Amino acid sequence: MEKIFVHPETLYDVSTHYCPGCGHGIAHRLIAEVVDELGIREKTIGIAPVGCAVVAYDYWKFDCSEAAHGRALAVATAIKRVRPQNIVFTYQGDGDLAAIGTNETIHAANRGENLTVVFINNAVYGMTGGQMAPTTLLGQKTSTTLDGREQQKHGYPLKISEMLALLPGVHYIERVAFYNPQGVLKAKQAIKQAFKNQMDNLGFSLVEILSPCPTYWGLTPKESLDWIRDVMQKEFPLGRIK
Amino acid sequence: MSKKRILISGNEAIAEGAIQAGCNFYAGYPITPQNELIAYMAKHMPLSGGVFIQAESELAAINMVYGASAAGARAMTSSSSPGVSLKQEGISYISGAQLPAVIVNIMRGGPGLGNIAPAQSDYFQATRGGGHGDYRLIVLAPASVQEAYDLTQTGFYLADKYRIAVMILGDGVLGQMMEPVELSARKANTRILKPWALTGCKGREPNIVKSFFLREGALEEFNLKLQKNYGIIRKKEVRYENLFLDDAKLILVAYGTMARIAKSAVGQLRLTGKKVGLIRPISLWPFPEKVFQPKSKKVKYLVIEMSYGQMLEDVKLAVNGVAQVEFIGRSGGGIPSEEEIVRKVHKII
């Protein structure tokens, strides 16, 4: 009988430290499945972010480096330039990629670095306790926007994927969301595409995932998924951006 | 067989020394007075099969060095004072992840944007770590273009040997001036295996490059490991030059460009019968403390800096109150002259 559901070889068989309903576990697993399916575990080098996923290397079974907050794409650029035969990707949150690391993000993309980026957008800083992120929605309450984000005081949610799509060095950008199983499957396809692009030397590829953070959204896991579907994806439309 | 001698600037000599030592990754950002270095690397690094990147910022440049070193490369960046301040976060991470790296600081006047005149005012930043956390860099201070070439090679060797960041600390005079350099490979060419590097986990367990230790007690355990490494370096890697210590009544202490001027003053004073000597620390960390153990309390020291009393503190710690320590310092464009030193010496002895 054919086995159609197995534990990925690339994922250690351990429990994660993530909160109930968090999207990181799903994203980690999708990356592990893609790495298995492409047969690249032994040449993959991952860059773990600063944030909730800082110990992602406790879950993935391939070489990993930490990077300082925001600097993942500078670190990844150098690793890939030194070892072009390896597959190098960064895993970054919204604060990492679109606030403190905006410069590194834009310039790695603009150089057309042959890298894969998995960008977790959960509209909030998780590890530090739920502060406003660059992607926090207008009206969204966080520990630093107590009455909700206001455009006059805090600016607008930053659509960095759309900004990056303007750069000629960028090959592929897609936004996906984890609010139902179909969305998760689409996310996996997009991640696979982004890794394949690197294997085919096509240049900079980024997958933005709208991912739930029930703890700092103050919602149940189910309500969080509904919020992505009903609210968040209206601000961050899904689909192929480039 | 005649060795090849060429006339180059200090900045170019550091770049050429790096390439000679097998440096195969350089990332930098333009800043005066070290621009000849990045320009030299842009031209020569690709010729020797290495990677050159002009980074979008000093932060990116130092983090590229972090990545390249994590992947097993011999990696270097260079800058000048304000730029080196920006690199400090990355240097702390490099130290925490025990990555070998060579960082060049061709110092200019500060604080702030300061000016582009030569200075030595980043001594504290260089020798005390510079960023957050308990860590040290090996700091090497060349006083000639030849020494800049040689010490850069040594720097790469020490960086790999101890898995530590090494800083080549010069000033704008050293970076800009041209002198003949004899090109020869030093021990730095010895390749050191890096089983910890990120190369893909084929045939082994995954490698992790990190500086995060969350489990209770783990960071303290790691910090003690770092301290043990620093202890070995303190014992084995002290470098200095000295002159006339046997009979000196007054010992001049200076490093880098300042030491050349001090050396001229020693020559002039000796001709007039003044019993002066010189200590020139070459490794600013580890500091050559042991050479400051006077046989009698009558020996005095005169520290001379292009800064306002930074190395002075290390000399006072080394002397530990036993001897008198005098000081001349100028910074922000001024350099203590040979005449100023001679006048001061005449006042002291």
Image: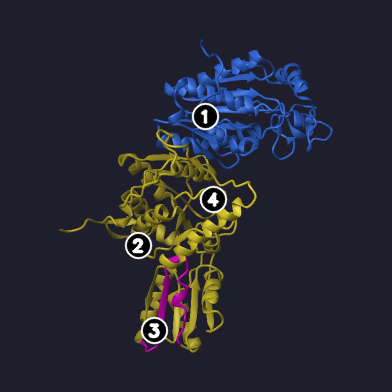
Sequence order check, earlier mark of 2 and 3: 2
* Left or right of residue B66: residue A17: right
* Left or right of residue B270: residue B132: right
Q: Residue at x 49, y 23 (%)?
A: A36
Circle 3: residue type: Leu
Q: What percent of the width, then of the height, locates residue A228?
A: 72, 20
Which residue corresponds to mark 4?
Answer: B96
Judging from the image, mark 1 belongs to the subunit labelled A
Q: Which chain is yellow?
A: B
Disc 3, SS: helix
Q: Are marks 2 and 3 on the same chain?
A: yes
Q: What percent of the width, then of the height, locates residue B309?
A: 56, 71
Q: What percent of the width, then of the height, locates residue A63?
A: 48, 36
Circle 4: residue type: Gly
Query: Of discs 2 and 3, which sits in the foreground?
Result: 2
Disc 2, SS: helix
Which residue corresponds to mark 3?
Answer: B269
Q: Residue at x 55, y 16 (%)?
A: A189
Circle 2: residue type: Glu
Q: What percent of the width, then of the height, locates residue A158?
A: 67, 28
Label 3, residues with CA under 10 Å away: few <14, some 14-19, many ≥20:
some
Does the segment drawn in magenta span residue B105?
Answer: no
Which residue corresponds to mark 1?
Answer: A109
Label 2, residues with CA under 10 Å away: few <14, some 14-19, many ≥20:
many
Judging from the image, mark 4 belongs to the subunit labelled B
Q: Are marks 3 and 4 on the same chain?
A: yes
Determine the residue located farthest toward the right in the rendered image: A147
Which residue corresponds to mark 2?
Answer: B147
Q: Are marks 1 and 2 on the same chain?
A: no
